Amino acid sequence: MIATGNERVEELAESTVDQLLSVAERLFAERGVEHVALTHIVAESGQKNRSALHYHFGSRAGVLAAVMNRRLIPINARREALLDGLAADAGPRDVVRAISAPLGLAVVEAPWGADYLSILAQVTFHPRLLGETGVDDALLSGVRRGKRRLAQAAPGVAPALLDQRLTWLTNSVVFALARWARDTPPVGRTSAAVTTLLDQLAAYGTAGLLAPDPATET
């Protein structure tokens, strides 16, 4: 089948957008989101149309959200699949690992994994980088489902306290994985290495989640 003129235009637009997002992802990871202007991304991509990025995304926050959404699609799918694989009576450690594992696995399985972790760590520390744009809420379904599974697996922890501790744990996991990805040479980013790291993070995180509440101790 011969492509129509409109189809060719759409394919070209998709190719341009994909290239711009890939360049933006690399620059955000290498230089830091706050140090990358839209003009830098366009120049690095070799695009002649300097208004292309602004046309598609509006602002740096819009570009950042698009970069993250693109990677959240496979990450969320992996998280959902891991949660699907848990037994009905899975313990807190297994749930914590299922929530965390997609991030670590991305580093060793995907060429973009390390860059994504670097960007995620920046956004975790500075949520304002996303402005009012935010990421696609539908791509956080695995996180929400994981929270529900944890509440079932740890009924002895008050819901508000569990939610607070899970936020702390999530931040810790993101920063630990981002630092590991940054400091570990590519040759050392193996499945065995990340499996060990994820197991340790799950053990550490579960201990914190289930620790007695000092406010109720006598």
Image (spheres, rainbow, N blue to C red):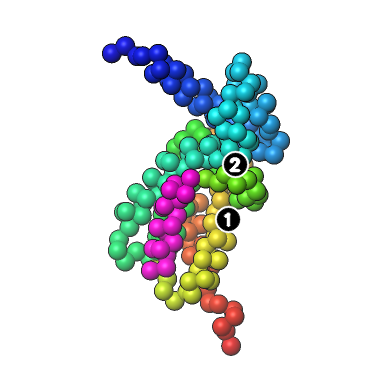
Q: 10 Å neighbourhood of mark 1: few (<14), some, or many (≥20)? A: some
The residue singled out by tag 2 in the image is: 119
- Inspect this view and state whether residue 108 appears: no
Magenta stretch prevailing secondary structure: helix
- Inspect this view and state whether residue 217 appears: yes
The quarter of the rendered structure image containing the C terminus is: bottom right
At horizontal 61% and vertical 39% (from top left) the residue drawn is 61
The percent position of residue 48, horizontal first and vertical second, equals: 61, 15
| 2 and 1 marks in contact (CB < 8 Å) | no
**Label 1 SS:** helix
At horizontal 63% and vertical 27% (from top left) the residue drawn is 41
> Given the current orientation, which residue lies at the most extreme right position?
35
The quarter of the rendered structure image containing the N terminus is: top left
At horizontal 69% and vertical 39% (from top left) the residue drawn is 34
The percent position of residue 63, horizontal first and vertical second, equals: 58, 35
Q: 10 Å neighbourhood of mark 2: few (<14), some, or many (≥20)? A: many
Identify which amino acid the numbered label 1 is placed on. Asn
Residues drawn in magenta? 136-152
At horizontal 60% and vertical 33% (from top left) the residue drawn is 58
Queried whether the magenta region covers residue 84, the answer comes back as no
Figure quadrant of residue 180: top right
> Given the current orientation, which residue lies at the most extreme top position?
2
Query: Counting residues from the N terminus, which is met first, the one under dot 2 or under dot 1?
Result: 2
**Label 2 SS:** helix
User: Label for residue 171?
Assistant: 1
